[in-house]
Amino acid sequence: MSISLTLEALARLTEAKATEGDAAALARRLTGIAALADAGPDDLSFLGNPRYAAEVATSRAGAVLVPSDHPGAPAPGQAFVRVDRPSYALALVCAAVEASLWPRPPAGVHPSAVVDPAACVDPTAHVGPGCTLLAGASVGPRAVLEAQCHLGAGASVGADSWLKPRVTVGDHCVVGARCRLQSGAVVGSDGFGYEPVGDRVERIPQVGVVVLEDDVDIGANTTLDRARFSRTVVGRGTKIDNLVQVAHNVRIGRQCLVTAQVGIAGSTVLGDGCVLGGQSGVAGHLRLGDGVRLGAQAGLFEDVPAGGFMNGSPAVPFGLERRMAVLSRRLPELFKKVDSLAAALDALRKDAP
């Protein structure tokens, strides 16, 4: 990846509060982005976490995005670009880079796409090679379907959404506006519904749908099961990582973050602003209030009120789990003490008259 960015353009992109540096630094054209420790004179870097503040002074970066109140001055040949939030400022730069590296493809339907006559594609949308759209499917304005995407009967993709290659949106499922679905995502696979009947297990038809509200991101190879009935819902602005399993009739609130390899069992409800750490698992039919957080690999089996922070498996409040973890490391020592006390007690009993 390479970029070509002047300090003037960088300041404009990031809405910088100020730029500092000598004439050579301010005239430099940046051609790369790198971490503080790895950056060279032609690279842009950033201070997004205060723990790395000491690295700014030793970094060879040509320009560094720093907080507005960062102390000190740039080294010779280096520029500081002072912004409110360096990490977000870098995201704005990367958005511009992304647009140049992967420009929006032209409107139209590729000749190899198979589009049912009863499907509807907005004339400003792009439908890539090998896509299939069944009867009643619809693609909104400026939406992009890259190669080999599949929209089932009656499925819809909203305005400005972008589906990467091999995304599947099942029958009658809904993808809202400005959503981004990475390769291999499946929206509307059958929920895992079965019923033991005598000596066999019968499949329960899953006749509901999945609804992604606006501004939802779905990671690669993540699966969202259609509801047994009614809807599986992902709320507006929620971001879901790769390899996540969302079961039938789950409802995820707005602006949640669900990281890699999380599993959420059926009919569980998450409030707004929840954060689920990597590989955490949530049992079915639970209720998580607004702002609940789960640590990585947490296993949750009970409801959690708003603002709760749970960790461990089975998950308990974070502070309690940390104390338990500290105490567990002392168990060998405690067992030795108990054995020693038991031996001393036995000796006293033997010596007793």
Image: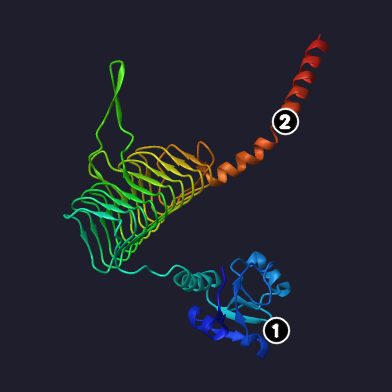
Could you tell me the amino acid type at mark 2? Pro
Foreground residue, 278 or 171?
Answer: 171
> Measuring 67% from the left and 75% from the top, which residue is drawn there?
61
> Measuring 34% from the left and 69% from the top, which residue is drawn there?
106
Which quarter of the rendering shows the C terminus? top right
Foreground residue, 147 or 177?
Answer: 147
Instruction: From the viewer's perspective, tell me whether residue 59 is left or right of residue 312.
Output: right
Foreground residue, 325 or 129?
Answer: 129
Q: Earlier in the sequence, mark 2 or mark 1?
A: 1
Instruction: From the viewer's perspective, tell me whether residue 251 is left or right of residue 240.
Output: left
Report which residue position mark 2 lands on: 332
Could you tell me the amino acid type at mark 1? Gly
Number of marks: 2
Label 1 CA crowd tier, 10 Å (few <14, some 14–19, many 20+) = some
Residue 320 visible in rendering: yes
Q: Position of residue 141 (x, y in %)?
A: 26, 67
Seen in the picture, residue 205 relative to 270 is either above or below; the reply is: above
Quick one: which residue is furthest to the right in this view?
A: 351
Q: Quadrant of residue 157?
A: bottom left
**Kind of element beneath mark 2:** helix
Residue 22 visible in rendering: no
Which quarter of the rendering shows the N terminus? bottom right
Q: CA distance from mark 2 to mark 1?
A: 57 Å
> Measuring 18% from the left and 53% from the top, which residue is drawn there?
136
> Comparing marks 2 and 1, which lies closer to the viewer?
1
Q: Quadrant of residue 197?
A: top left
Label 2 CA crowd tier, 10 Å (few <14, some 14–19, many 20+) = few
Quick one: which residue is furthest to the left in this view?
A: 118
Checking the image for residue 77, the label placed there is: 1
